[in-house]
Image: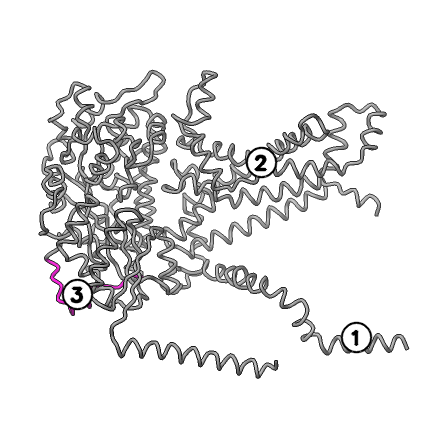
Amino acid sequence: MQIAAVAHEADVVRESRPRRLLRGPLPFLLPWLVGFLGLTVVPLLLSLYWSFTNYDMLQSPQWVGTSNYVQLVHDPLFRTSVENTAFMVVIGAPAGIILGLGCALLLRRPIRGSALYRGAIFMPAVVPSVAVAVIFIWIFNPDYGLLNAGLGLVHIRPQGWLADPSLAKPSLLILLVWEAVGQIMVLMLAGLAEIPGELYEAASLDGAKGWQRLRYITLPLLSPVLFYSFIVWIIFYLQFFTEAFVATASNLGAPVNSTLFYSIYLYQSAFSFLKMGYASAMAWILFVVTMIITVILFRLQRRFVFYRGEQHA
Amino acid sequence: MSTRAATGSLVAAALALVGLTGTAASASASSTKVINLTMWQQWGGGHEEAALDKTIKEYEALNPGVHITETPVTNSAKILTAISGGTPPDIIDLGTSLEVGEWASRGALLPMAPYIGSSHLNLNIYVPSALDALTVNGQLYGLPFMDFDVGLLYNKALFKKAGLNPNDPPTTTTQLEADAFKLTVQSKNGTITQLGFLPDYPGPSNGQVCTLEDMGWVFGGQWYNSKTHAITADAPQNVAALNYETSFYKKYGPENMANFESSSGAYLTANDPFESGKLAMVYDGPWALQYIKANRPSLAPDIGVAPFPAPPGKPALSGTTFIDTNPQVIPRGASDPAAAFAFIKWETSNPQVTATFAQLVANLPQLKTVPNFPLAKDPRFQLFIKEADSSNAHVWPQLPYSTEYGVRLCQAQSAALYGKSTPAQAMASLQTTMKSASGS
């Protein structure tokens, strides 16, 4: 009897599913679905098609096969943009995470004013990136900037910062890490709070010193958070655009292409040079590279990332 | 509601819409009066926009039923997106012709020929070089409004202080270099507090590509051979021009030059290097005089103007300049091109409007004859008018890839100035890149 009733109910469900969908979740999902299809899926597929065409947005695209991809390989500026971006990824992501972790370790225990320190370090994260870029353009000003004024007090020669081709990238990194440290610190603090105190207690009883406790307890138990941060920040630096665009708005990539990052060159190819096909090819290469890096990181995860939940299973 | 009912109501709604627009169209056709035009203009807000609004009002009064709505738009990506999306304005007033070649050759702008023919506009009223800036593949794509070119502006007070004769500006590039050296004050640690000449300034800010193109012309070079349709970036004269620019950077140190420029205020403000009296000579246009008058009245009488010097032994090249205009163009997809043309024809061929604007923005009249306006009596301004009509006034080549050529030219220039490559290498690599970009 009961079984029959359930079967009957299932039939009812099957019969009226479209109607139930319409009355139930679909109207709520629709605004998102429309946006997702219209603003993400369709453009994504179109850009894949355009990457095999010559397309200037004014005339209809012409199929050119893999010619855009072949040209990219021989384009010296493409290589420059890859090198500049690699610099940011390799230095920026670890620098932000190490500093963020450092701040979290220092502010982990409730010392006097720790809430104030935490707040101050997190503050940059709530400032819009365009505003940050504009402020730093002034801080980095060679003659009137705060940074050179500060260096002058300790008798260090004023630097060109954003104007000097060899310093422009490190200068941008200073700005970006300053923005990132607070966000990373908050994440790390949450991760640290999850680590049970008994483990440290037990380790102390066994005679573990501060460094050993960090190396054998804190870092392994924090590894999922570290892993997440690495992925997020590597992707951020691969796509890095806003601050560099604002800082060099009138002359993208200046000085001497030292801030010509991948996304900047992509934007320039599309909207200044009207090479939407070329830019689409760049976008797809970036997508594939990001994917490969993420897959590699997930593979490495098995060796370096330690999930406590798995121990019980 | 059933699917059929939904479809039915949709169709009904669509029919109603068609009906509505149909009536609107027939109403305007019957009265033949109401024409609404939109115009995107680059003058921005302030007194320039006010002058444009006054001009538009005057036109509307002469042509009852025509309404023109202007909006300040300077972002070329926005203009491009609007044209490619099929929703452009009817008239675009561009700040420079730098993108005209690219857009016109890709079908984004309407050629003027059909409208000129039917309206009997005589093109001989315009200064010829301004029309060159709007000519792509022999076709005219827009009408010129307010031309501009550049010459040597120099600070007489600084000349006096350096022991130079303020009424004897350099006439050769060699002399300019020597004068610049005397006009430069550099501290022991390299910081430049006063500079004679900054060869890549003001660059793109004043509507040029980046100064190197002017310098190439100064040395007798060309950037494109219109007969053979070939890029000529690596011409020896162009390399010589870049060599000349680089010699300044070598002498004072690239990082010191960069610091000098980036620590100065924005172009055409009281703190820009020239207006603040830190830069003695600049390759700039007549509008700079107006800004100085407004920002630093005491400095204004001390600014001398001279033709830009020529290379030694080639006096015929004296007074070389770029020439450009504010193109009034009609984009593809404009709702009423004929009405749009009627306005730009009136605007650009009206001597009074031209004189008013020339006085206001200190640009050159695009018309050969205009009523006298106060600024035209200033001999310094007259020099720019004379230059505009000389064979030494050049137009950046109008090609399908002009923008890319310009951007890469600037990149080549800065690579050489900062010693990342030699001038010859920089120009050779520009030549290779642009040859492949142009598909030749």
The Cα atoms of the two marked residues, 2 and 3, are separated by: 61 Å
Instruction: Report whether B243 appears left or right of B76.
Output: left
Near mark 1 (Cα within 10 A), the count class, few <14, some 14-19 or many ≥20, is few
Between residues A253 and A200, which one lies in front from this camera angle?
Answer: A200
- Kind of element beneath mark 2: helix
Q: Amino acid at mark 1?
A: Ala
How packed mark 3 is, by other alpha carbons closer than 10 Å (few <14, some 14-19, many 20 or more), is some
* Residue A96 image offset from top left, x and y in percent: 59, 35
- Residue A116 at x, y percent in the picture: 64, 30
Q: Amino acid at mark 2?
A: Met
Q: Secondary structure at mark 3?
A: helix
Q: Is residue B346 magenta?
A: no
Residue B32 position in % (x across, y down):
25, 75
CB within 8 Å, label 1 to label 3: no
Separation of residues labelled 1 and 3 (CA atoms): 75 Å
Q: Amino acid at mark 3?
A: Ile
Chain on which label 2 sits: A
Mark 1 lies on residue: A10
Q: Is residue A153 left or right of residue A103?
A: left
| B323 shown above or below B303 | below
Q: Mark 1 and mark 2 in contact (Cβ < 8 Å)?
A: no
- Which is closer to the viewer, label 2 or label 1? 2
Residue at image coords 53%, 36%: A176
Residues rendered magenta in the picture:
B108-124
Q: Which residue is mark 2?
A: A123
